Image: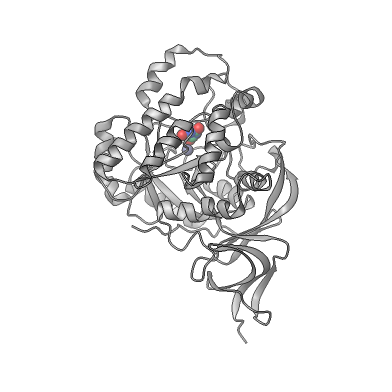
């Protein structure tokens, strides 16, 4: 006789939208079929989650998997494998590749490649440029596209739309929420001559100072108000922006990065030197404290890693030649679970920030909630497991993490995507079976 369910997850403490409950979950055809199923129910496969917490599949809405570009540091197969080992069920991938994803041809290539090569589900950003504005409204409706990404200030790669005139045209050109890298390019360029090669790595946060980010965000909020276009401010890094953004919750959503919640200057630059350099920069304790306060009061919608691998040798270069960006897709969940264990946020809030939050901000369908009918995506975590993050655990070919040596309490034990276990006890299972996430158009 055919089993009632394809999979049952028994006895875990489930992080449901309305609270935590010890219950069992039945999965059929890749979706959650029922919660609270009885002892007698049968399944083709049963996972005993006694002693574990069952979270909705955790999503990293901000990764740079470098594909196409440089497979010696990262690629879609390696970056998505790192994601499932680290407890993620979906990642949203940035377009500043070589070449960049800015047109229908590049996007079609990536859509097809993801369906063959990704270990987890993926959303794809399309990069806005000054020349592809007329195409953005059509591109943002394509399968798997989570958002248009605009670099309003320069970072890795050459994607940029820095002036108000073009930014306004971008905002008038479609409907969906636009994701912004918010730093004021004019101020960045004006401040560059104040520094020289070989200055301390901590100068990164002086060059790209608070006003660079705050001015960028003020300009974007003025344009969002004028055009009525919803905006998502990626990796907010200053106390000033977090305070300011509270007046724009009707039109703007926000992301914080795990790096800005875990480290601060000057310590981070003394310890990690080039391995602490990213955009926007890691700043001092005042901004770290403001980030946690904003996370607790609900100003923040989601958390990302901004996984942005560069070769180890390049990160040894002096400042400012050192490329900006830190790896993080594999360490995001462990580091955030450690923050939960340290009492900085609850598991319920973590699920809001890493499951419901990205689903709400980007309009992901069938993701982000443990509820009947939703995709059967789960991250099973052991909140008591004690491990240490080490460079040799990192799957990404670049082979390093800024969290090397960090002791962690709380660890992902299993990753399940649309009812298929793809990671158990740190091992990837089967073959890549990731799909494009579906988004509300
Ligand atoms: O530090 C960063 N690295 N910030 C970005 O905005 C881009 C990223 C990268 O792609 O290297
Ligand atoms: Zn980024």
Name the residue at 55% across, 29% down. Answer: 286
Residue 386 in the image, given as x and y percentages of width and height: 75, 47
Q: How is the protein colored in the picture?
A: one colour
Q: Residue furthest bottom?
A: 1
Q: Is residue 339 visible?
A: yes
Q: 91 or 338: nearer the eye?
A: 338
Q: Position of residue 71 (x, y in %)?
A: 54, 40
Measured along the vertical axis of the image, is residue 216 above or below residue 383?
A: above
Q: Is residue 332 above or below residue 30?
A: above
Instruction: Decide if residue 395 is in sight here.
Output: no
Lateral position of residue 317 relative to residue 40, left or right: left
Quadrant in the picture for the C terminus: bottom left
- Give the left or right position of residue 388, taking residue 167 as reference: right
- Compared to 67, does 423 lie above or below? below
Residue 150 placement: quadrant: top left
Question: Is 50 or 244 nearer to us in this picture?
Answer: 244
Q: Position of residue 370 (x, y in %)?
A: 54, 64
| Quadrant location, the N terminus | bottom right
Res 23 → quadrant: bottom right
Closer-to-camera residue (340/305)? 340
Going 52% across and 35% down the picture, which residue do you hit?
290
**Hey, which quadrant is residue 400 in on the image?**
top right
Q: Position of residue 352 (x, y in %)?
A: 52, 54
**Left or right, residue 441 beside residue 293:** left
């Amino acid at each position: 006789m055919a089993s009632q369910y394809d999979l049952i997850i028994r006895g875990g403490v489930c992080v449901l939208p309305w609270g935590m409950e010890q219950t069992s979950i039945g999965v059929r055809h890749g979706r959650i079929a029922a919660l609270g199923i009885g002892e007698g129910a049968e399944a083709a496969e049963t996972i005993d989650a006694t002693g574990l917490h069952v979270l909705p599949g955790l999503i990293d809405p901000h990764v740079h998997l470098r594909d196409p570009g440089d497979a010696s540091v990262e690629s879609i197969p390696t970056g998505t494998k790192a994601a499932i080992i680290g407890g993620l069920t979906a990642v949203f991938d940035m377009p500043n590749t070589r070449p960049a994803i800015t047109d229908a041809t590049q996007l079609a290539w990536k859509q097809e490649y993801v369906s063959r090569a990704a270990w987890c589900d993926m959303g794809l950003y399309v990069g806005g440029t000054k020349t592809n504005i007329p195409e953005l409204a059509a591109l943002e409706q394509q399968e798997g596209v989570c958002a248009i990404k605009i670099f309003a200030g320069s970072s890795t790669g050459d994607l940029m739309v820095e002036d108000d005139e073009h930014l306004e045209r971008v905002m008038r050109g479609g409907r969906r929420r636009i994701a912004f890298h918010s730093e004021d390019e004019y101020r960045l360029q004006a401040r560059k001559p104040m520094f020289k090669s070989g200055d301390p790595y901590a100068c990164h946060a002086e060059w790209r100072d608070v006003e660079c980010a705050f001015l960028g965000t003020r300009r974007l909020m003025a344009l969002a108000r004028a055009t009525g276009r919803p905006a998502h401010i990626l990796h907010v890094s200053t106390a000033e922006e977090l305070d300011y953004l509270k007046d724009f919750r009707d039109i703007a959503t926000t992301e914080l990065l795990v790096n800005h919640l875990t480290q601060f200057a000057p310590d981070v630059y003394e310890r990690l030197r080039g391995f602490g350099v990213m955009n926007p920069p890691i700043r001092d304790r005042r901004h770290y404290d403001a980030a946690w306060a904003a996370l607790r009061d609900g100003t923040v919608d989601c958390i990302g890693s901004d996984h942005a691998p560069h070769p180890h040798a390049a990160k040894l270069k002096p400042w400012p030649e050192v490329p900006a960006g830190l790896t993080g897709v594999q360490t995001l969940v462990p580091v955030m679970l450690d923050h939960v264990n340290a009492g900085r946020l609850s598991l319920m809030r973590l699920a809001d920030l890493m499951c419901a939050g990205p689903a709400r901000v980007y309009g992901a369908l069938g993701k982000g909630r443990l509820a009947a009918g939703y995709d059967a995506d789960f991250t099973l975590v052991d909140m008591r497991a004690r491990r240490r993050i080490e460079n040799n655990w990192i799957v990404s070919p670049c082979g390093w993490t800024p969290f090397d040596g960090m002791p962690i309490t709380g660890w992902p034990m299993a990753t399940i995507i649309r009812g298929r276990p793809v990671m158990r006890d740190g091992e990837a299972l089967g073959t890549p079976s990731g799909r494009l996430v579906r988004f509300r158009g």
